Image (cartoon, grey):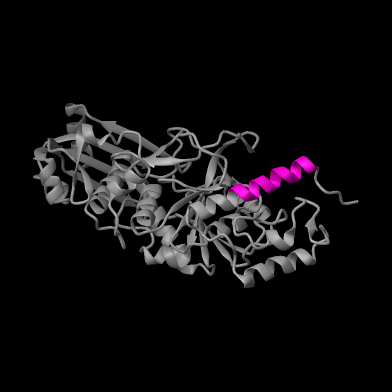
Amino acid sequence: MNKMPSLVEQIKNLVGTAKRTYERAKEGRKVLVSPIEREQRWGKCQICDQLTGTRCFLCGCRMDIKSWLASERCELDKWYSSEIVSIIIPSLKEKYLQRTIDNLKETAIGEIEILAIEDEKEEGRRVLINRAAQQAKGKFLFIIDAHCIMSHAWDAKMKQALENYQDLVVAQLDGINEETWQVKDHYHRFVYLNRDLVEKWWGKSFEELPVVQETMAFTGCAWMVHKSRYWELGGYNETLEKYGGDGSEWALKIWLSGGRCLLHLDVVCAHLFKEEGEETHSVLPEEIDDSYQKLREIFYEGKGPLQKLSIDWLVGKFDPVPGWDQSLTTKSIGGSIVADKKEVTVAKKQISEVRDEDGKLIRKVIKIFKGENSSQEDLQKDPNVHDKAKESTEVLEIKVMDLQEDNTWKRITITDPEEIENWLFENE
């Protein structure tokens, strides 16, 4: 027999409703849903076996009133949009891909389609996701890694958070115990960008409500956006390196074009964090650094897609941000924060790849030549100065990656001048 919650629980629910509604009004967001959406909500309540009169057995609320409030949800998640979510899972020899797919099917309560694409030729995460997004049928895109567990009703809750077409919403992250495949309950929530525009976990204090809060950035896993907004911003920038900087790229695109990055505290993505050396891709740290360098060149100069705001605006919005004490080492120029002038070494890099007859990458070599000095001012005036640096015949470092039979990568770094000379003699 159905029974109402205790009086204490009902008061707690009422206070929560009042607080969420107040927070929305304070942020300038709509408090009431449209009459059409309200009728849809109330109609679902009226045919629900948890309703008695106008009150719900699960929360004790007056649903004829609660169904008007934009901040509120049905305890059984029956109010949410029925529009399709296209889930995109880029995979590179991922052994837990099927577990991830099974979990997504189990935990979604709305209609979904799953687009899992294997990076057989190591074209890169950005290329794969763009290709899948072109095939996607859904109104929303959800990007997730191939080794994750999502919490119940993640799809419905995240769709509801995207009432503003320009926004993006991301789940809070947790860890997975690989042996038991259980969630660790060690939440990672807010993320900030450091001076180099690299994503960093932000252990700042926060209020539990509202359940959807703004975050400066995110890590690039478990995020949702309107598909049309994704393409409005050009999709993933394929001129960046194959991997790295996902969260920075999309946080900057969204914020600086007038949208918001939102963290949903009621949606959890448990993620298997790989240990150092367990990477299945062939991308070296130096190449990932190149992605961040290109992001700095784009967004510090105000050249991002639909960009109308500067990075110093974003830093000011979330001030204080760790490491962004402008009075110490930075100054504002033309609406962007840039480093003070100083000399740096600009080195020429040469990257070569070897593929088998099927086009599969089997070897990558990066040679770093002796560089020449250049100033930060030169770098600001000409972002391509790295590519134009005079190429010396003196090789300072060689990094080699070879694909092994078990599909893992063997990596070696050569810095000794005599060993470099021997390697060049034997391989070129």
Residue 309 in view:
yes
Among all residues in the image, which is located at the extreme right?
Answer: 1
Residue 255 position, x and y percent, is 37, 54
What residue do we see at 46% from left, 34% from top?
204
Residue 78 in view:
no
Residue 274 position, x and y percent, is 49, 36
In this rendered view, identify the residue nearer to me: 412 or 188.
188
Among all residues in the image, which is located at the extreme bottom?
Answer: 36
Examine the structure image and report whether residue 158 is included in the region drawn in magenta.
no
In this rendered view, identify the residue nearer to me: 410 or 202.
202
What residue do we see at 63% from left, 67% from top?
82
> In the rendered image of this protein, does residue 214 appear above or below residue 112?
above
Quarter location, residue 113 = bottom right
- Magenta part, dominant SS: helix
- Image side of residue 205 versus residue 291, left or right: right
- Residue stretch in magenta: 7-19
Quarter location, residue 69 = bottom right
Examine the structure image and report whether residue 15 is included in the region drawn in magenta.
yes
- Image side of residue 62 versus residue 94, left or right: right
Residue 193 position, x and y percent, is 35, 41
Residue 308 position, x and y percent, is 29, 59
- Quarter of the C terminus within the rendering: top left
> In the rendered image of this protein, does residue 171 appear above or below residue 129?
above
In this rendered view, identify the residue nearer to me: 169 or 61.
61
Label count reads: 0
What residue do we see at 83% from left, 49% from top?
4
What residue do we see at 56% from left, 55% from top?
158
